[in-house]
Each structure stands twice: as C-alpha cells, then as structure tokens.
C-alpha cells in the first residue's frame, strides 16, 4: 500500500488527493487559497508589504529565506542534496569508467 500521508479526501497527492490551482489552464497543485506557488499560493513573507512566497523561516528568498551556497562569497540558492552548495559550486562526482 501507499505510505504517503493523506491530504485531501482521504488520499495522498499521488493518488488524487490534492486540489489543482484555480487559475484557468494551470495544472499545478494548489498550496493555499486555491492557488499554486506561481499564482500566489503558499505562505506570504513576514516582512511588511512583501507579497512573495516564503521559502523558510517565514521569509522569501530576498529577505533571507532559504539556504545560500557554502562557497565563500557566493549568494546563490543551495540545497542539501548538493552538499549545501549551488549547482555551480557543488562537488564534482568522480567519473565512472564503463570499460
């Protein structure tokens, strides 16, 4: 059976439990208020008058939400899967020979 948690109508998102964005023609999942992230769904940044969607800690990217690259002087977005670096500075994987 499915191990994902149910979100809507007793189903997980993989099995039809999510709701779609209410903007005409959009096929993305709604985050909040019937809208996907691209159309303004999700939690708004906690900084006054900012209408951007939060990434982490209640803040949008501009106001300090999200991880930054660990490479000194780089301010690009980073992810844990890239060892806390951006795509440009992530450690290179060793090439595996197919011979």
Image (cartoon, rainbow, N blue to C red):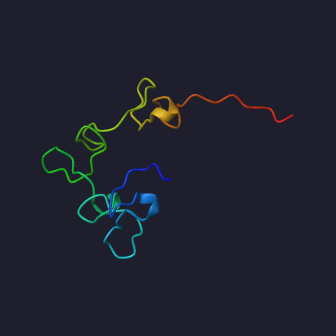
Q: Position of residue 58 (x, y in %)?
A: 22, 41
**Front residue of this view, candidates 47 and 37:** 37
As drawn, is 61 to the left or to the right of 88?
A: left
Q: Compare residues 5 and 97 and report the one nearer the observer.
A: 5
Q: Which residue is painted at 26% across and 59% down in the image? A: 32
How many marks overall?
0
- The residue at the far left in this view is 48
Against 80, residue 24 (above or below) is below
Position in image of residue 54 (x %, y %): 27, 46
Q: How far from the left and from the top, in percent, is residue 55?
A: 31, 44
Quarter of the image where one finds residue 24: bottom left
Residue at horizontal 51 percent and vertical 33 percent from the top: 82
Residue at x 75%, y 32% (from the top left corner): 96
Please state if 12 lies on the left or on the right of 59 as rendered: right
Nearer to us in this view, 11 or 23: 11
Identify the residue at image location x=50%, y=29%: 83
**Viewer-nearest residue: 70 or 16:** 16
The image quarter in which residue 41 lies:
bottom left
> For residue 39, which quarter of the picture?
bottom left
Figure check: 83 above or below 17:
above
x and y percentages locating residue 79 in the rendered image: 45, 36
Of all residues shown, which one is farthest toward the top? 72
């Amino acid at each position: 059976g499915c191990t994902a948690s149910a979100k809507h109508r007793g189903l997980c998102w993989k099995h039809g439990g999510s709701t779609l964005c209410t903007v005409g023609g959009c096929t993305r999942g709604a985050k909040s208020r019937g809208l996907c992230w691209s159309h303004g769904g999700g939690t708004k940044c906690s900084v006054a008058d900012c209408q951007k969607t939060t990434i982490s800690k209640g803040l949008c990217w501009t106001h300090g939400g999200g991880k930054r690259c660990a490479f000194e002087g780089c301010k690009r977005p980073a992810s844990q899967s890239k060892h806390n670096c951006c795509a440009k500075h992530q450690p290179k994987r060793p090439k595996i020979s197919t011979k």
